[in-house]
Image (spheres, helix red, strand yellow):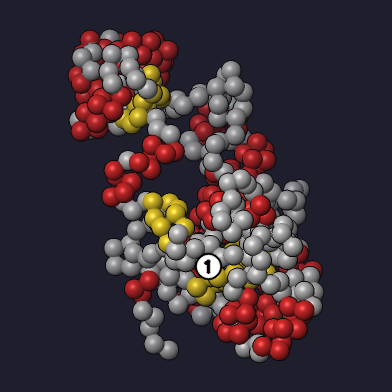
Amino acid sequence: MPAPDLARGAVTGLKVVDLSRVLAGPLCTQMLADHGAEIVKIEPPSGDETRGLGPPFDAAGQAAYFGAVNRGKRGMALDLSRAEGRAVLEALLQDADVLVENFLPGTMERWGLGYDAHLSARFPRLIYCAISGFGADGPLGGLPGYDAVLQAMCGLMSINGTQDSGATRVGVPIVDYVTGYNALTGVLLALAARERTGQGQRVEVTLFDTALGLLVPHAANWICSGDAPGRLGSAHPNIAPYDKFAAADGEIFLGILNDGQFRRFCQKVGRGDLLDDPRFRTNADRLTHVAALRTELERTLAGFKSETLCRELMQAGVPAGAVNTVPQAFAQAHAAHRDMLVESEGHRAPGIPVKLAQTPGRTGRRPPRFGEHTREILAEAGLGDAMIDRLLDAGIVAPQRKDPAQR
């Protein structure tokens, strides 16, 4: 077999069957698509739930949320609860490298599509990635998992927010998002192993494991000290000053990690006197007296414009940034320089965050309309027009329509 042309990306030639919905799985496969993989997204007849999570909706009636994690894919809908639908899936797996699914544990086994009992023997080179809330066994095994619920259960909410706000959900679905990256990592590791062994394997990623793994450095602090971490707002439990502060025209964030940065900061804002104050000489001293330090800094920073101050501090090697809104974040000149707002076929979205020098990848087609590529995908799998018509008539595959809610 000739080597693939990697002009589209590092995993050009890789075929992925994506049975996942919502966020973690679709994000994993979108990142593979950005780097050249061919993704066949298979939705249930009711559609991926995120198509309806709006407003806002695009011109085709699907939510912006769906578009955020499904670019670069071809799509169809398939009823896997029926034997004929499962037969179609197996036809699609004949030349697939990776399958990604996030059904409740046991669902694929109940359909006769479990990896260990069925697929591994029929498709020995297949990488099977299972994403779930808690895994299949154990005290919570088989239960559904949702980002915010895992944030609550695994302690992330307990360290987010202020004493006044109480425990607060992180403003982005951080558990789902990092689970998607963990799934991507697992798939790539399994592909690397397959290069050596010739064999595929099962990759398991859970929201529960991801959420606990996100507790850096809070879990380590608790293990070492025995003290349960609390809510610090935007502050850091181990570093000071590492927090947001009000400037003359808005808020800024200071991320001062070491004594050298603190010294340069004090010199830049005309507070060299703080360097001689025994309360602030080292990071440990500053943490001990963090309330007094905040009082001094707020009084000082109130006399500075945020944009000018942050620019000058960064140029001096002191980490600082304005607290921007989402539109302000994408309006930054550096966002354009890094190609972090892109457009493809009329679909605008954040760009590719992982950049490879020799195989940079590129964003692919717009997110698929519901059932858009059904005939194309099935014909490539060897099904004739008559068979495709029969599957459509029987409702085993769904025809293209504007939105799953619009029959």
**Which quadrant of the figure contains the N terminus?**
bottom left
Residue 131 position within the rendered picture, expressed as x and y whole percent measured from the top left: 63, 58
Label 1: which secondary element: strand
Image quarter of residue 86 = bottom right
Amino acid type of the residue that numbered disc 1 sits on in the rendered structure: Lys
Q: Kindly identify the residue that appears in the image at 60 percent across and 70 percent down.
A: 372
Residue 350 position within the rendered picture, expressed as x and y whole percent measured from the top left: 43, 51
Q: Is residue 397 left or right of residue 241?
A: right
> Can residue 20 be seen in the rendering of this structure?
yes
Residue 282 position within the rendered picture, expressed as x and y whole percent measured from the top left: 31, 20
Residue 49 position within the rendered picture, expressed as x and y whole percent measured from the top left: 67, 55
Q: Is residue 325 left or right of residue 226?
A: left
Which residue occupies the foreground of this view, 323 or 232? Answer: 323
Q: Is residue 354 left or right of residue 180?
A: left
Which residue occupies the foreground of this view, 404 or 339? Answer: 404
> Can residue 34 be seen in the rendering of this structure?
no
Above or below: residue 164 compared with residue 217: above
Image quarter of residue 82 = bottom right
Q: Kindly identify the residue that appears in the image at 54 percent across and 41 percent down.
A: 172
Q: Kindly identify the residue that appears in the image at 40 percent across and 33 percent down.
A: 324
Above or below: residue 391 compared with residue 205: below
**Which quadrant of the figure contains the C terminus?**
bottom right
Residue topped by disc 1 = 73
How many numbered discs, if any? 1
Q: Are there few (<14), some (14-19), or many (20+) residues within 10 Å of tag 1?
A: many
Q: Kindly identify the residue that appears in the image at 55 percent across and 22 percent down.
A: 162
